[in-house]
Amino acid sequence: MHDTDQLLNRVLQRLDVIEGKVDTLMSAQSDVDAAVAALNEFLSDVAEQITAIQAELTADGTPVDTSALNAVIAQVPAVQEALDALAPATTTPAPAPSA
């Protein structure tokens, strides 16, 4: 019976280590999710500001060279796609290991 108790204790210790690693991964995923959300919010704000700048330039009728602005605007969809790729496919946490 002594060997069985030792084996059970080793298994329980390893399960504790695994649980700690799962907790760390889940915390890291939460951090990534928060970063993606913040970046998406930032990108949305930038897009709104670009639209406002373009509207002001159009309304003023001021002859300005907007080619640099247009080049930056053209990159916004690529940035959005890159951020979308970072977002997790699902927010459902991975199932806990079977006991």
Image (tube, rainbow, N blue to C red):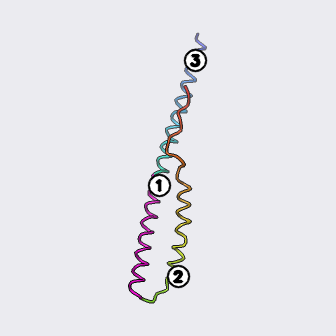
The residue sitting at 42% across, 66% down in the picture is: 45
SS at circle 3 = helix
Badge 2 local density, few (<14 within 10 Å), some, or many (20+)? few
Residue 82, how many percent across, how many down?
Answer: 56, 60
The residue sitting at 41% across, 88% down in the picture is: 61
In front of the other: label 3 or label 1? 1
- Which disc is residue 35 wearing? 1
Question: What residue span does the magenta drawing correspond to?
Answer: 34-61
Residue 65, how many percent across, how many down?
Answer: 49, 86
Q: Is residue 34 left or right of residue 13?
A: left
- Which disc is residue 67 wearing? 2
Q: Main secondary structure of the magenta part?
A: helix
**Residue designated by label 3:** 6
Give the residue type that dot 1 points to.
Answer: Ala
Give the residue type that dot 3 points to.
Answer: Gln
Comes first in the chain, label 2 or label 1: 1
